Image (cartoon, grey):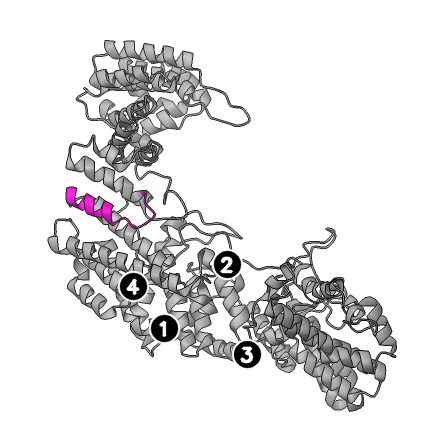
Amino acid sequence: MKTFKKLSLIFSAFLITFFCEIAVNLACGGEIDPYDYYISYFHNNIEGDEYSPFAYNQMVYLNSETDVESEPDINSREWAKYLNVKKDDVLKVMYQTDSATDVKLVNFDGNMAQLPDSLQQNSFIQALGKHKAPLKYYQFAKSCEPLANVTFSLWDATPRDTAKMAAKAEEGLALTAAEKDDFLKLRYAYQAERMFHFAGLHTESKSTYEKYIKTSKINSAAKGWALALYAGSTRRLGNTEESAFLFSKVFASNPERRIQAYKNYYYTSSPVQGALKYAKTNNEKANIWAINGFGNADAGIESINKVYSYEPKSQLNGTLLVREVNKLEQDLIEANDIAKIGYNYYFQDNGNSKYRDSIKNINLKRLNEIRTFAVKLATEKKYPQPELGTLTAAYLSWMENKDFMAANYLAILKPDKLPERLRDQYRIVDLLIKAKNIKKGNPFNENDLLPTLKWLDEKRFAENKIQPNGQYYDHDQAGKRFSRTTRNFYQQILAPAYLNMGDTAKAALAMVKGDLAYQTLKENSLFQNMSYQSINFWQNNLSPRSMQGLALYKTKAAGNDVTGLLASALNQLKNDDFYELYGTTYLRTHQYDKAVQMFAKVSSSYQYFTPQNWYGDGTDSKLYANPFIETINDFPKKYVTAKASVTKKTFAAEMLRLQKLLVSDKKNAALYYYKMANAIYQTGYFGNSWFLISYDWSSYDNSTPAKYVYDGDYKKAQTAKAWYLKARALSTNTDFKAKCTFMLAKCLQKQIIMNANPLSFYYYDKKDVKWRNFIKANYNNPYLKELRFNYNKTPFYAVAAGECSYLGDFIKPKAQN
């Protein structure tokens, strides 16, 4: 046979079914959550919130872009103390007025009547009206704002007016020199420095700082803001190492500018030793090492050891320690197959096992280094909360599967004496240790876990007070630590344990329980409240027996045990999705009488799953099935109109009718078997009714091994083949037998495709064993040979050979090797 004939087989027999429909309905997880892409049980805020923006997060530069302190709040407090007025009144006038009000305030001369009624009772405005010097400064600061706060836009890149800023800076210098009040003098100098800086006059900006701000005796956050400008000017003038050091000082002194100082430190591109050249105190050195630790996504034991050696009492130690633990979690805790999260769900690691083992050994070495440090933190007791070290050592031991060691570390602690966040973490680690038999797949007393599981529920419900309406992205994911911990425990530990024990139903309950973060559900349908991982597990792994078990568990929701806790979660949800899936499992196992019973329990208004028609003309965005139609070719799939469509419910009823006719009308049994075989064939990956037994379809399905109970029909057409054989055996009509034989050839072809190597078809490699076997298997398809030699005179043969290129290439007598 000529090469082009071989290629014709490849394209007709494989690529058409595999590539031509890129994806009808590829189910995929939602957008990756940067705060939830690896398994974590060690909360990144247990040492407080002061450095929470710098918690470990490999997917984003910072864990949070919001400083832990507010600059407007700090400035308003300083003004409130200075003038003895209300802080909120200062905040309103300085930061929350509209442009029209700002104009009136800039021209305010003390006459309250010229202001809006809403401001006449404002204590800050009243004080400005009585004190001319603060009012003069306020109006000068307001006049600087439009020059400094120029919004950059690619569409309207308006440059700053450097000439006006330079003039304002000179005006500010004159006002600074003339002002006697230290509070106002500092702020005038800051405004002058800022105007010089933004005007690009960095030498003048630095000299203003050195002359008026550095020497100021007043204690004010404004000195830190001025130092940040000074550091920036130092960088612009070429001294990046000193600039990095100065930004580290702002990082330490001004929590409201900490994130900005952190970013600017790295913008200098200065090596750590460059900044350290300017550090004189242990505190300064510790902060430099801490910044380098926060900016390191890899192992950071050097930074944590340095910080501890310089400032063992600093909270930086605890924050860096927790950060290192979180890194180890990402590297060492493997997500379970049934509930993988993050990118690992989509891209499996098929690398060399020796390489993976080598990386694991490196990470275990890191774990031991971090645990050694944690024990040192605990035993030396220089750190204010040495219990953190013991708790960390316990958790790392659990991670290493050394549960006895973990329990011994935990036994040292007295949980009732711990601060709240450490106490909460203690309970989580204690739960993990108690679950040691669960993790190993051994029998366990699940009710020992009940008190902690109830406590976890309370914690995550407190994080999720109100369920938003509709589809949404929760922008507060960074704070949902207990929600993630609870979900991970149920889905990564408890559900796999139930699976190992053979209780798939209870595993499914655990999956749902892990997802239900809200105590009260607004939309209480089953699949609307599940994660993609849980939906995938339910829709693909559950059998009729599993559904029977779930139905039984639903009756035990009132029990005061773990089973009751799990079942009560399921009972929060309406039954429609439950019975629709129940019926689908019976469709997959061809128990149509029971499928009809289950679909009868589904509400009449229920919308059965219908996939999107991504390639439609816009008149109807859905694809509709009719599995009882006959087709020669699999591609293009022959979908129907909505009016002619068949739902799961009507499909079950018709298949049950045909099953009964097999008994009551035996003389036409061949026809009934043929109709049923056609229907089952169409519910496969290659048919127009795949969504009667599957909930998603992807062009990649045909390249992955069969793993679900229904894949025998969905991917291999096994039942269809069996029923075509019965139909053919019961018939005496030669043309009918020809149709059955043709369909048998197609059914066998599906199994041949499943054994092929899809990569071979990209480059037509004759040496590839899988490719050669694929070609050979198709040459030797026995049903094609039967069709060619036994049925070549039938009307069907002539029609099929004319429509099917597969037949045209391989079963015509002239097709020779």
Between the C-alphas of marks 4 and 2, the distance is 25 Å
Q: What element carries label 1?
A: helix
**Badge 4: residue crowd in 10 Å (few <14, some 14–19, many ≥20):** some
Residue tagged by mark 3?
544
Where's residue 638, x and y in %?
A: 75, 64
Between the C-alphas of marks 1 and 4, the distance is 25 Å
Return the mark for residue 346.
2
Q: Which of marks 4 and 2 is nearer the N terminus?
A: 2
Where's residue 306, x and y in %?
A: 19, 44
Where's residue 118, x and y in %?
A: 40, 25
**Badge 1: residue crowd in 10 Å (few <14, some 14–19, many ≥20):** many
Q: Does the magenta stretch include residue 368?
A: no
Return the mark for residue 399.
4
- Is disc 1 in contact with disc 4, using a CB cutoff of under 8 Å? no
Q: Is mark 3 on a helix, strand or loop?
A: helix
Q: Which residue is drawn at 27% across and 30% down?
A: 241
Can you see residue 31?
A: yes
Magenta segment boundaries in residue numbering: 295-311
Q: Which residue is drawn at 23% across and 59% down?
A: 368
Residue tagged by mark 1?
562
Nearest-to-viewer mark from 1 and 3: 3
Q: Is mark 4 on a helix, strand or loop?
A: helix
**Which quarter of the rendering shows the N terminus?**
bottom right
Is 18 located above or below residue 203 in the figure? Answer: below
